[in-house]
Image: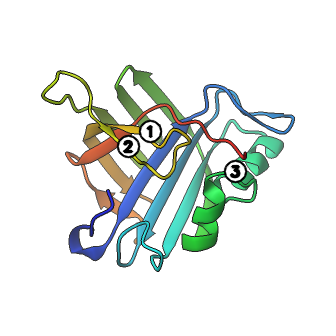
Amino acid sequence: MAGTPDDDVCTVSLAWHIAEGNYGDVDLNGLNVGMLISTEEGVMFGPETEWDVVLLVDETADDDQHEAIEDIYFGRAGGIWAPVADTHVRSADVATVPISFSRDGAAFSVEIGDVLEMAASGAVGFNEEVGTISPHPLTKSHEVRTGKSTTATVSYDDQFTWDVSGNNAYLGDFELASS
């Protein structure tokens, strides 16, 4: 995760289902969010690495929810995304799209309009348990479970087009908080 990416380019597809959450008095329960990240070179979290980002907001979000999601994921709300946005984001775009998300234990699948299709499941280690990685910089607990994708395709524009099916995946219960 912290090593030099293939061809010195890092492409990342992220998706969240907000099981329970709010931003101030804005209810975010049940919404889905996706994010695409592309770098031109370098290790993703290297201090000099700049990201181009597309935030994919669930079409079911109303205007207040849409604004709240942008504030959270672009770091304006503070929390773990604030230093990421301040340090890495070079350009950002937002798209409103239909998002379907399903999860069964350590397996999940996500479809985001005609932009993204992902499916992955936990990678079981020698002890018959899904492996973990720690520290992970984008989670409050600093831990995620390891997985393997069966499908991981993106087609947004020329910069955000890739197929990394069959590669590593990370999954888990994320807790985002501004304090």
Q: Are marks 1 and 2 in contact (CB under 8 Å)?
A: yes
In the figure, is residue 36 to the left or right of 4? Answer: right
Name the colouring of the figure.
rainbow
Q: Residues within 10 Å of mark 3 (few under 14, many from 20)?
A: some
Q: Position of residue 31 (x, y in %)?
A: 64, 33
Question: What amino acid is at disc 1?
Answer: Glu
Q: Position of residue 155 (x, y in %)?
A: 40, 58
Task: Using the image, determine if residue 6 lies above or below residue 81.
Answer: below
Local SS, label 3: helix
Q: Residues within 10 Å of mark 1 (few under 14, many from 20)?
A: some
Number of on-image labels? 3
Q: Which residue is mark 3?
A: 72
Q: Residue at x 46, y 80 (%)?
A: 48
Disc nearest the viewer among 3 and 1: 3
Local SS, label 2: strand
Mark found first going from the N terminus, 1 or 2: 1
Question: What amino acid is at disc 2?
Answer: Glu
Q: Residue at x 46, y 48 (%)?
A: 14
Tell me the number on the disc at residue 111. 1
Q: CA distance from mark 3 to mark 2?
A: 23 Å
* Residue furthest left as drawn: 126
In the figure, is residue 14 to the left or right of 170? Answer: right
Disc nearest the viewer among 3 and 2: 3
Quadrant that contains the C terminus: top right
Q: Nearer the viewer, residue 41 or 165?
A: 41
Question: What amino acid is at disc 3?
Answer: Ile
Mark found first going from the N terminus, 3 or 2: 3
In the figure, is residue 76 to the left or right of 74? Answer: right
Among the 4 quarters of the image, the one containing residue 175:
top right
